[in-house]
Amino acid sequence: MTESATGPTQHRHDAIDALRGFALIGVCLVNLLSLSLYDFLDEASQRALPSAAFDTLAITVVDWLVSIKFITIFSLLFGLGFSLQLQRAGARGEDGLARYVRRLLVLMAIGAVHAWLVWWGDILFLYALVGLLMLPLRNLSDRSLLVLGVAITLLPPLISPYMKPLIAQFPSQPEMYSRALVAFSSPQVGVALDGNVTLSTWMRVTNWGLICFVLGRFLLGYWAGRKGLLAAPEQHRALLRKIFIGTLLIGVAATVLGSVQAPLRAAWPLLEADPARTLMRMLVRIGPLALGIAYAAGFALLFCRPAWARRLRVLAPLGRMALSNYLAQTLIGIGVFYGIGAGIGPDYGMAAVLIVAATVLCLQLWWSHAWLARFHYGPMEWLWRWATYGRRPRLRKRARAVLGAVAD
């Protein structure tokens, strides 16, 4: 949607908004695994839960179908959004870079507050930081974007040997998770906040590979935005079909490889050599990336069909309010599972995670439709836009427009 500083002036791309809403569903489910504190339990504690058998099955399904794939879609869409912003600025005869930088700096501030004062698993701060790295790469050719996007995604296994000595001075993941479980189970706000600050800082240092993860996907999404694959999917069905089939096959093959790599190394000792192990890790990293792309391409192909477009368009309001809904999911998760909230914690395993995720997403889907029937933006999207432009945009829709939306 092309917008003025004070309000929207054209229709949005429903396919992109709906895909963002679809991605938010998977992101919510995966994030609640951490927010529920289940991820912080060691293996013995997880096996000791009454729901251990169901938990194992549920987590296997989530790992195969959801984990990393949906945040891949989310990241691709961020890179695609960068392309759309430059295109819109160019159509208005503007450069658009200064506004883009302001937009990212505001998002970085929101992410910093969210990451250190609310939830350590925040992705917004990193998105804003990596978004700034996109600026010097914006004029690369299409071929360069594709090659560099994939190459950066596969880079961490090559860098890892040089990073391990630097990371070794920090506490191990089991140690940090054990501390976090105690802190987040505490009913004292100060204890939970201190634990969050510590874990957030530790995670951003030790999980350095996330920069490559995000930047690689941003570049691929930027390429897709240039091509207009999601802005006008009906015009690119043939290419989308090739992308879908190719990435689906590659993704399944790499995922299967990841699940059998341990017995393969046991059967062929040559695979235990460092070059072979590095190559294996690089190939395995292709799996979630390829499947995330396949999900996005498949979604776009379905959206080209009128009957499916009507069904999938239901997710568009959820995606239009992605920032508001993402932050709300954090607050709800903390309110339900943390000791400073209801204190349910990890005792009910994956059943609690799935029930809370389904409830939250149903409520947010309803709320997003109801809110956008009356307002142009979600509440956080409105504040983000206000801070970016420096003047308050119009929030409430006119009464006639509201009545028309309700009647529809």
Image (cartoon, grey):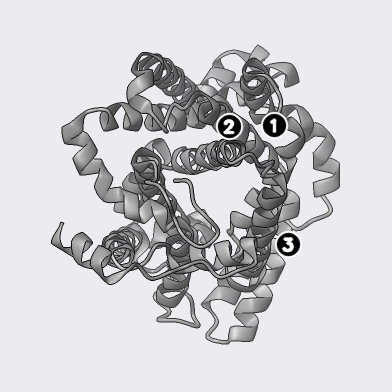
11 on left or right of 67: left
Tag 2 and tag 3, C-beta contact below 8 Å: no
Single out the residue that lies furthest toward the front: 93
Q: Circle 3 sits in a helix, a strand or a loop, which is it?
A: helix
Tell me the SS state at disc 1: loop
Per the image, the residue denoted by label 2 is 222
Residue that appears at 53% across and 23% down: 261
Which kind of residue does numbered mark 1 sit on?
A: Arg
Mark 1 vs mark 3, foreground winner is 1
Q: Position of residue 232 (x, y in %)?
A: 38, 29
Q: Residues within 10 Å of mark 1 (few under 14, many from 20)?
A: some
Q: Considering only vertical position in the picture, is 26 above or below 369? A: above
Spatial separation of the CA atoms under disc 2 and disc 1: 8 Å
Q: Which mark is residue 163?
A: none
Name the amino acid, label 2: Tyr
Residue at image point 44% right, 46% down? 1
Of helix, strand and loop, which one carries label 2? Answer: helix
Residue 324 on image: x %, y % = 46, 64
Between 258 and 332, the one nearer to me in the picture: 332
For disc 3, the marked residue is: 201
Q: Could you classify mark 3 by the number of other residues whose Cα lies within 10 Å: few (under 14), some (14-19), or many (20 or more)?
A: few
Q: Are marks 2 and 1 in contact (CB under 8 Å)?
A: yes
Question: Residue 138 has which mark?
Answer: 1
